[in-house]
């Protein structure tokens, strides 16, 4: 196997999609082709807005990039690793090591504290709690500006605070890639700006590549780059 070489040009490509198509219910009367051949390169540290009309295929694209769904055809590599031949277990490992998710709904466990929620991915990976995990979760809560809320139940936080906890949880495993599917969609404009500012800071300070689905043109304009999904094809 090739030695790890951080200077290799492929290492800085976090997402590479080549001609990705997605057909739901293939071979049936209700077969629907949603993505028609997507090419996309996302490099380390790029913050890319994903826009496009409702139903155009943005979430389908993010689910494929996030290894939650498989393309019907075409190539997908995450951090230089081709995914086509990987089984579910290998995909889960690749996802766990490299990708964090933030969705429109926070998906926190509301009966757990904010800190416990942030510890969850680390606990899942290690299998048992330890002090380093606890300290990292505390540092993440501080970095999202919520130290004083860390021992509160997640269900008792405001929508904006819950989404910032969701960002902290997504960063727990130090992912190279953050997939954010309308993370500000349910928030008032002040909270939406706070969550966006947080993502921007993470991107600049840690070099995390971000795909950020949004219907908000003002936020998209603050990203490095904007792509548009229109009827299952990319423009921009
Ligand atoms: N599992 C599925 N089975 C069949 N069709 C699906 C499935 N998932 C999504 N679709 C269809 O794929 C199309 C694209 O959906 P998708 O959720 O990717 O759009 P979107 O651009 O994210 O929309 P929105 O902005 O409203 O969230 C829609 O027509 C949707 O009905």
Image (tube, rainbow, N blue to C red):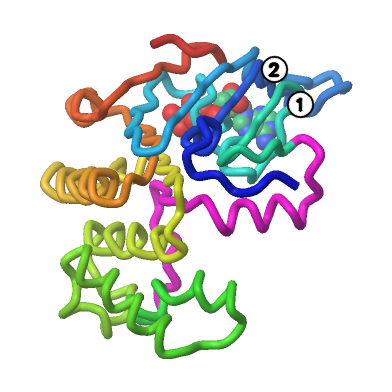
Q: Which mark is residue 175?
A: none
Q: Is residue 144 left or right of residue 233?
A: left
Taking depth in this image into account, of 156 and 178 the one nearest to the observer is 178
* Ligand 1, image quadrant it occupies: top right
Q: Are marks 2 and 1 in contact (CB under 8 Å)?
A: yes
Counting from the top left corner in percent of width and height, residue 176 is at 45, 48
Look at the image and give the residue range highlighted in magenta: 84-111
Q: Residue at x 65, y 48 (%)?
A: 3
Badge 2 or badge 1: first in the primary sequence: 2
Q: What kind of element bears circle 1?
A: loop
Magenta span has 105?
yes
Q: Which mark is residue 72?
A: 1
Residue 59 appears in view: no
Q: Residue at x 84, y 19 (%)?
A: 29
Q: Which residue is mark 2?
A: 33
Counting from the top left corner in percent of width and height, residue 28 is at 87, 22
How many badges with numbers are in the image? 2
Taking depth in this image into account, of 36 and 204 the one nearest to the observer is 204
Q: What kind of element bears circle 2?
A: strand
Counting from the top left corner in percent of width and height, residue 130 is at 47, 89
Q: Residue at x 39, y 40 (%)?
A: 209
Give the quarter of the image for residue 164.
bottom left
12 vs 124: above or below: above
Residue 44 appears in view: yes
């Amino acid at each position: 196997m090739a030695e790890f070489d951080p200077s290799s040009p492929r290492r800085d490509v976090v997402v590479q999609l080549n001609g990705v198509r997605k057909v739901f219910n293939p071979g049936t009367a209700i077969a629907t082709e949603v993505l028609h051949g997507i090419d996309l390169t996302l490099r380390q540290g790029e913050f890319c807005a994903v826009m496009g009309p409702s139903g155009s295929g943005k979430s389908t694209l993010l689910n494929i990039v996030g290894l939650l769904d498989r393309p019907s055809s075409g190539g997908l590599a995450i951090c230089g690793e081709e995914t086509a031949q990987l089984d579910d277990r290998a995909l889960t490992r690749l996802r766990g090591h490299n990708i964090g998710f933030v969705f429109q709904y926070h998906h926190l466990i509301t009966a757990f504290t904010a800190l416990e929620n942030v510890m969850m991915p680390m606990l899942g990976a290690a299998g048992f709690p330890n002090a380093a995990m606890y300290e990292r979760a505390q540092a993440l809560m501080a970095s999202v500006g919520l130290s004083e809320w860390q021992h509160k139940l997640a269900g008792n936080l405001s929508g904006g605070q819950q989404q910032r906890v969701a960002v902290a949880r997504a960063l727990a495993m130090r992912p190279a890639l953050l997939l954010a599917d309308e993370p500000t969609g349910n928030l008032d404009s002040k909270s939406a700006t706070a969550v966006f500012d947080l993502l921007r800071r993470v991107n600049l300070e840690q070099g995390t590549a971000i795909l950020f689905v949004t219907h908000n043109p003002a936020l998209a304009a603050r990203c490095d780059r904007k792509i548009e999904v229109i009827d299952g094809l990319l423009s921009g």
